[in-house]
Amino acid sequence: MPDQERLVNSFCEMVRIDSPSDFEEDISKHLEERLRNLGFLVERDAHGNVIASEDGDDPLLLSAHMDTVNPGRGIKPQVEGDLIKSDGTTILGGDCKAGVAAIMEALDSAKQEGRSRRPVQVVFTRGEEIGLVGASNLDYSMIRCKESVVFDGNGPVNQITGSSPTYVGFDITVTGRAAHAGVEPEKGISAIRIASDIIGELPQGRLDEESTFNVGTITGGTVRNAVPSEVNITGEFRSRNVEMVDSLRMQLITTLDEARRKYREAVIQEELNVMFHMYNLDPNDPIVQLVTKVMGEMKLIPNIEASGGGTDANAMRLNGIDCVVVGMATNGMHTVDEYVVIPDLMNTARFCERLLEAQ
């Protein structure tokens, strides 16, 4: 049976270990030591993902990611009744260390009680928050599992991600021509003006139930008295509809082509990258049926809903692993108002333990 005090202490210890994306070394070492103490063979692949394995047939993959978003350094967790929060100056890091803590507590509990269970592999990935980089570069030749439960969902454990969108990131560079803004502005070509025209023609926000579009950053210019010669724009669009993904791609390209015709002396370059691909959960998949069965035995009602976000499951499913993403007790992800509900965190650990004992 998972121990609440141990689980909360473990979680708080882990969120105090700084691990923003690309800086996961300290949390990796912490988890490697704990997994070795549980009897696992622990390795890292070439990308730095932590992979823990044990003997046995038909292992189940348990997975979560180690990195957090910013502001995520110097986190000071505060336990207030049934909630764990930050001190308000940083995120909490529940995304995804609540998932990591639940997995580790389930394994700790199972070992202490000595009950038989299904063999597992554990994968803790790097760089999930910057585009599923760890899972996309995972050495799948090291993975023996065909089924996985990924602990990276918002809310309680019975919140199941039923579908996830395709995510396309874009980078646009506009190069104009610099000039003195007060002496000879007519000789310049303002990259900011061109970028503004482009952004003004693009959609923004929620487009329909399945699709969103966002311009996330715009940087450029050097000083206030110079016509700006270069601007960089980054953004994204997402949809759970294939046709909409193609439509948004064409709308972006058409907008850029129109800007090129209008500003013939400027140079406009773009790069589009599919960061992850969509999926829809099949309720008849054995791993889905197993997850919902265990939840039913715990008197939890599975709540399968579509998501606008992506997780490592998007990458793993492309590599032949049937995945289910479950909640991990975190709320308000990616904000300084993030919090973890302790009873929900306990349910996540209980679910993980019972999942391994299910026949």
Image (cartoon, rainbow, N blue to C red):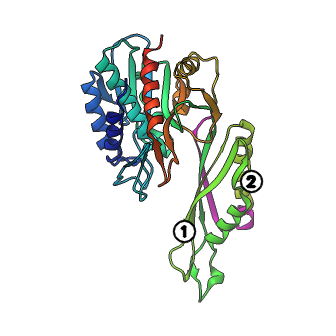
Which residues, given as a range, are shown in magenta?
259-278
Q: Position of residue 293 (x, y in %)?
A: 56, 17
- 359 displayed left or right of 43: right
The residue nearer to you, when weighing 202 against 152, is: 152
Q: Around disc 1, counting alpha carbons within 10 Å, would you say few (fewer than 14), some (14 to 19), or many (20 or more)? A: some
For the N terminus, give its image quadrant: top left
Q: CA distance from mark 2 to mark 1?
A: 23 Å
Tell me, yes or no, whether the highlighted magenta stretch contains residue 260. yes
SS for callout 1: strand
Against 2, residue 253 (above or below) is below
Contact, mark 2 vs mark 1 (Cβ under 8 Å): no
Q: Position of residue 239 (x, y in %)?
A: 68, 41
For marks 2 and 1, the one nearer the N-term is 1
Residue at image mark 1 = 220
* Residue furthest out toward the front: 81
- 226 displayed left or right of 28: right
Q: Is residue 140 visible?
A: no
Residue type, mark 2 in image: Thr
Give the residue at x 51% y 28%: 316
SS for callout 2: helix
Give the residue at x 50% y 53%: 335
